[in-house]
Each structure stands twice: as C-alpha cells, then as structure tokens.
C-alpha cells in the first residue's frame, strides 16, 4: 500500500521532471486567511446558489497564493496520482447532527463546506448537478442511510463501494469530483480509495491497450439514475481508454461494466487487477477536501460501521466540468442541472440507445 501522505506526484513522463505534492497542508497563516475569508461570506448557497457561486469565485482569487498555484497547476496537468488533497481548511463551527434519511435538507447555519467546494471548483471549471442524482443538487450531502446500507450507492456503509469513474455511462461525465469532509465516522474506519491510470498504463500489454481503446465495453446505468436492479452492461457502448494514446483518459466501473468480446472481458480483468495493485487510500477528515481527476482516476470507499444516530460520516460532494456549454442541450434551461434521459437504457430496445451513444 502506498502512503498517500508521502506520495510525490510527478508530471507525465514526457514532461520535465519537476514534481508536485499530492497533499497540501495549509500552514497556520494560511488557515487564518481562510478563516477570514469564510467570516466574510454572508450569503446562503441554498437561497441563491448562482450569487453564492459567483462570490466564491472571487474568494478563490483571495485564497493563499501557494494554494491557488497548486490548484491551477493540478488543473493544467493533473499529477501521477490524478488526485489532490487539501488539509486544514476553515470549518463550520457549529455542525448539526449528521442526517440519516435521504431528502433531509442541510441544516447548517454556516457554509464553510459549500464555500470551499465552490471556491476550489473555480480552479477547474463549473459545478453541475444531475437531475437523477439527489434531485439535481449541485452541492450534495453524502452520508450513510439504513435504506441504502447494502447497495452500490454513495449512501451505503455495509458494503465496499466498488472502484468507478463517476457516472461512467454519462455523455457529460464530470471532469472532477470533489469531496469535503464535515465529519468522520465515529470509529474512523471509512477510507476513500483511488487509482490513477497513470500509475498502471505502462504495465498494460500492447494488445490490452488496443482492446481498451476500442468501443468494446458497456457500463451499466447507476442505481441512482434508475437502474434499481443493478443490471450490468445496460448503458452505452464505450472504450475504457480514450484520448491521448500515450497519456489516456479512462472510463471504468468495476460493478457495472462488461466486455462485449472475450478480449474485452480479459482486458477488464487486467484493469481490475492493476487498479487493486496501485490503489491508494485516504481518510477524508473534517476540513479536508479531496479533488479527484475523474478523467484519469477511479475511486471507491471502504466498508465502515454506521450508527444512524447523528454521529455518522458526513461529506459534501460537487461534480465539476471544464466546459459547461458542452451540455447546454441537455441541461434544464437556465440552470446547471444536466437532465440527460436514460430511460431508453432501462428495459427498452438497443436501437433506442443511439442518441446517447452519439454524444460519447
């Protein structure tokens, strides 16, 4: 197991050999600076999100210069881990009990988590929501619930949430996924795991690479998007690897993706083994923000004990796209909410899938 806290993430092999750390610990003066910025934000994101998000962009430009430089550098070239962890951000001082039921609204009286998610998003693009995911919420509360404890859902706790690209089936996947820690689980068991294609790409054979670049795979639609039976391979036909043939992007879902040919199935098994070989893990502590490059890095979450008594693990999550205009035809007019219809993949004919597949 690689120690995430000590990992140095290098530039892609063809670039110069300077390195950037995967973990950014705020210094004492930087922590105080973020506290002042938080104290100066009086807006409520749940009343007027657009105004809040605009002001949060301005806050980004007032964050410590060292932090801004590191975030912008990660946006420009990512890193070997395709992940970046900020630790020591100013926190909400009076955190209410963790919700225990889906649909429970955020009851915080201060908005530190919302501010840092929106401010850091400014380094990468624009936060978006997905209509089928938590009713299109832009900033999503993630906590365990009794009803989903054993499902492949972010609301689970009793099962391993398998390695996946966030909404791997979607034509408008987020480029980045950000997770901010509000509260750890009481036993401090929960770990977020991740694995970057940059860590294992050179371990693939030429034939495996060729297969993974081909449209020989189908990933299933997520549970939250209507696939309540967890059926595999119900989504569009896609490649696992795409983009630069020497430094590719990756789309992968261990639980829901299938290969359409024997070679594709073998290649998926190789990816599964390599992802487990290079995986790393981190505890997202209160005041920490993990940025995952969703184009290159898959993530997962360990099993942990949930108590459903207000003390449970509580994160906030945001999905960020580099180009908001790309999804304009699929967004609810005048909003950031992407509303692509996947009903054609849930119990109807293969011919009706073509509209979504053309966008991939």
Image: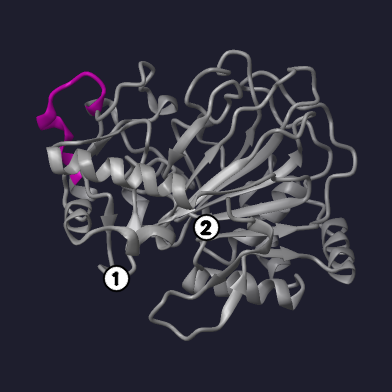
Mark 2 Cα shell of 10 Å, populated few (<14), some (14-19), many (≥20): many
Identify the residue position indicated by label 2 in the image: 126
Viewer-proximal residue among 280 and 157: 280
Mark 1 Cα shell of 10 Å, populated few (<14), some (14-19), many (≥20): few
Q: CA distance from mark 1 to mark 2?
A: 28 Å
Viewer-proximal residue among 213 and 355: 213
Viewer-proximal residue among 335 and 125: 125
Identify the residue position indicated by label 1 in the image: 246
Please provide the residue range marked out in magenta: 345-357
Q: What's the magenta bit mostly, secondary-structure-wise? A: helix
Residue 254 picture location, percent across and down:
37, 36
- Residue for point 47% across, 53% down: 278
Q: Quadrant of residue 175?
A: bottom left
* Magenta-drawn stretch contains 223: no
Viewer-proximal residue among 330 and 70: 70
- Residue for point 45% across, 34% down: 131
Q: Is residue 187 left or right of residue 277?
A: right
- Residue for point 25% across, 30% down: 233
Task: Find numbered disc 2 in the image and state the secondary structure of the residue it sits on.
Answer: strand
Regarding residue 52, the answer to whether it shows in the image is no
On screen, residue 79 above or below 344: below
Residue 43 picture location, percent across and down:
77, 50
Residue 179 picture location, percent across and down:
62, 47
- Residue for point 73% across, 78% down: 65
Q: Is residue 250 left or right of residue 89?
A: left
Task: Find numbered disc 1 in the image and state the secondary structure of the residue it sits on.
Answer: loop
């Amino acid at each position: 197991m690689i120690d995430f806290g000590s990992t140095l993430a290098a530039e892609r092999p063809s670039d110069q050999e300077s390195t950037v750390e995967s973990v950014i610990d705020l210094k004492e003066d930087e922590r105080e600076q973020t506290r002042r910025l938080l104290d100066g934000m009086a807006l409520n994101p749940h009343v007027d999100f657009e105004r809040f998000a605009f002001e949060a962009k301005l806050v980004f430009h007032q964050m410590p210069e060292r932090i801004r430089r590191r975030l912008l550098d990660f946006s420009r070239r990512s890193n070997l881990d395709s992940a970046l962890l900020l630790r020591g951000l100013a926190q909400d001082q009076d955190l209410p009990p963790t919700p225990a039921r889906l649909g429970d609204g955020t009851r915080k009286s201060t908005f530190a988590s919302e501010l840092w998610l929106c401010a850091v998003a400014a380094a990468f693009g624009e936060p978006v929501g997905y209509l089928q995911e938590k009713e299109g919420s832009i900033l999503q509360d993630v906590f365990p619930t009794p009803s989903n404890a054993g499902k492949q859902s972010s609301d689970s706790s009793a099962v391993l949430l398998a390695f996946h690209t966030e909404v791997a089936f979607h034509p408008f996947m987020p480029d980045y996924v950000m997770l901010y820690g509000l509260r750890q689980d009481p036993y401090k068991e929960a770990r977020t795991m991740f694995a970057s294609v940059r860590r294992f790409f050179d371990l693939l054979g030429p034939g495996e690479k060729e297969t993974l670049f081909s449209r020989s795979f189908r990933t299933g639609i997520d549970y939250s998007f209507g696939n309540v039976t967890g059926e595999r391979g119900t989504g569009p036909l896609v490649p696992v690897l795409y983009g630069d043939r020497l430094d590719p992007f990756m789309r992968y879902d261990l639980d829901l993706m299938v290969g359409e040919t024997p070679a594709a199935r073998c290649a998926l098994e190789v990816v599964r083994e390599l992802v487990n070989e290079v995986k790393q893990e981190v505890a997202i502590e209160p005041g920490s923000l993990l940025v995952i490059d969703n184009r290159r890095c898959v993530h997962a979450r360990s099993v942990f004990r949930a108590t459903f008594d207000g003390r449970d693990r509580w994160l906030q999550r945001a999905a960020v796209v580099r180009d908001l205009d790309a999804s304009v035809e699929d967004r609810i007019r005048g909003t950031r909410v992407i509303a692509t219809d996947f009903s054609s993949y849930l119990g109807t004919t293969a011919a009706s899938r073509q509209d979504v597949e053309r966008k991939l």
